[in-house]
Amino acid sequence: MNALSELGIGKMAIVERLDLPEEVGHHLMHMGFIPEARIVVVRRAPAGDPTVYAIDGFEIALRRETARSIRVQVVEEGL
Amino acid sequence: MSDCCAAETIEIKVEPRVSGKVRTVALVGPPNSGKSTLFNRLTGLRAKVANYPGVTVEQHFGKLNGIGRSDLTLIDLPGIYGLDSYSEDARVAVDVLHGEMPGTPAPDAILLVLDSLHLRRQLTLAAPVLALGLPTLVLLNMSDLMETRGGEVDTLALARELGVPVAKISATRGTGLDSIAHFLDRKGETLQPRNPAKLELPVVGNARSYRQWATGISTRTKYKAPLSSEWTRKLDRFLLHRIFGPLLFLAVVISVFQVVFSIGQPLSNAFGDLLNAAGSKIGMFLGHGWFESLLIDGIWKGVASVLVFLPQILLLFLFIGVLEDSGYLARAALIADRVMRSIGLNGKAFIPLLSAYACAVPAIMATRTIENKRDRFATILVAPFMTCSARLPIYLLMIAAFAPNKPIIGEFFGLRAAVMLSLYLLGFLAALFTARLLKSSILKAASAPFILELPQYRLPTLRSLGLRVVDRGKVFLKQAGTIILCVTVVLWFLSHIPFHSTLPDSVIGHVGRWIEPVIHPLGFNWKIGIGLLSSIIAREVIVGTLGTLYGADPATHSLSLQAALRHDLTLGGAMALVVFFAFAMQCTSTLAIVRRETNSWKWPALQFAYMSVLAYTAALAVNQIISHLF
């Protein structure tokens, strides 16, 4: 299991769990970050952080400090 | 907190609360699903719409005139992901739905607006909304786009699954709206509340079970997601590029200012000539006398001196409209997150701050999308530093009067645009500095997570851009026709009392000379002082005041306002004046909205004191330095 923040651009993963404070975690779950959801690392912002993730057909940007607490399982190489 | 809350409300709401006449209908849906666009269609009103999540932050009301049901009230609500209130704007929506918002009637029926391009995820909101037990119509918005991109959904099957009617619509094009009229007309004037127990709904408040439920339904209703728009990713590859991204951002900003001058200035000049010519025509018709003096030298000169900037202000709003409607604004927030983080603010605060370029009042309301209260207050306190459009008349006037029209980089970037850009930058830096100060002192807080949804790019429609420009023009004209008009009338009388006195001996002359010692070190004369006093109401009033005062003075009577100012002010004084305006809090509406949003007089008082001290000190420094240098 990896932290989402460790994944490179174009990597795909399955969300395992969110180690985040309840309110934040809950909000993210409503936005699609729920266990078993597929997530793709799309691109980084020009400054290298935040990173844009595609989940459920949406693109959502998270800072590294948040992505670090999202545990994922890498499934595939390349986009 | 959220779980228990939602569970409680469900227990209460299972009891059908209204049976009988429908009076109030609420628009519910996830952020950026097109609720406000539909609201505007159905009511004929003009709530603000744009392409980023979180545009609507409070409830709006309107009569359903668009479908001939003016007996019904429609409530537009901020977008929500679920029925737990994570941020202030979501709390508004949830409170209204539960009938707990003071002054807002509990809705009798719901129009649930879902973005059909992302139906699978958007359906998760259907579960808690249907559990409310109110008569509901599900509207699949942007269905035209979904179909052209190869998406499919069986609406009949979906209606069977959800136990409520479902219709495809396009709020932008206005298609499929008859289904709403039909839904509201059904069973005469009454709609029976549904019994939510009959429907198999997932465990309340559990995002995972909502999601499984939504996936199940979208599979059974043969939902085929449309191909995602390829050019959003292609554009982002460029607009969010490591090097080109920030460069393009800068290029966009510079070209906006350049256009305001290279195209806007000639337009404003022509408009000014037209107003002056009309003024003297009417003056000739009236003959000489006190009435002509009041009407032409007082009111006309005062109001027209502000009105001339209309073309330039509208051009700026056209650009802001393109940025907001295209979806670029959210990308700008992403690019700026690093800077925002370094001052301790959330990147999300960048969206309200950017919209403060138009006006601080809606920007302060837009801070409701910031989840952390201390971050939100810090953003509220710094928002008035952003250069709002009310500062434009005085900036444009002073730049036209004092900055020569010299090119810097060929035709593409001139000195005037550069001065304007530096004034915007000055305000932005003051905002950053103040935020940093606040976050390291009275508003210290752990940094809140940055969660930002990036909408797909859309081509702004001419209709929506046109409406924005027209609406903004109306606001500006209304301001000129009410506040500025009143101020010029009062000023004219005060500058002619006692009768047959010269301007320096009039009431206004005495007041002016009385305050002159305070502002003299800044390089201002007493007329500027009166301008500063009157602009406490609103910033643009100063230009009207100066127009009236210089019009009433025989020495400058025949000069244009620009020439009169050049005659009266040194370069140091002129620069001190614009710097004063960059920092000072001269806006009663902003103070009132800060009071409302922070629920205390403490914050607006602090803000006013801080900004006034900063404005005075900075203007003093600028005048002293420039006068010593030149």
Image (spheres, grey):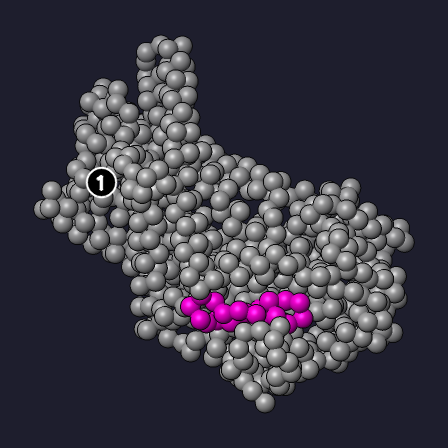
Residue A59 counted in the magenta span: yes
Q: Say whether residue B247 is left or right of residue B158.
A: left
Q: Residues within 10 Å of mark 1 (few under 14, many from 20)?
A: many
Residue B598 visible in the picture: no
The residue at 72%/71% (across/down) is B124
Quadrant (top left/top right/bottom left/bottom right) for the C terminus of chain B? top left
Q: Position of residue B300 (x, y in %)?
A: 38, 24
Q: Which residue is mark 1?
A: B574
Residue A54 visible in the picture: yes
Q: Say whether residue B8 is left or right of residue B413.
A: right
Q: Say whether residue A30 is left or right of residue B327.
A: right
What is the chain letter for disc 1? Answer: B
Quadrant (top left/top right/bottom left/bottom right) for the N terminus of chain B? bottom right
Residue stretch in magenta = A42-61
Q: Choose top left, top right, bottom left or bottom right for residue B246.
A: bottom left
Q: Position of residue B463 (x, y in %)?
A: 62, 40
Residue B426 counted in the magenta span: no
Amino acid type shown at disc 1:
Ala
The residue at 23%/28% (across/down) is B564
The residue at 57%/59% (across/down) is B234
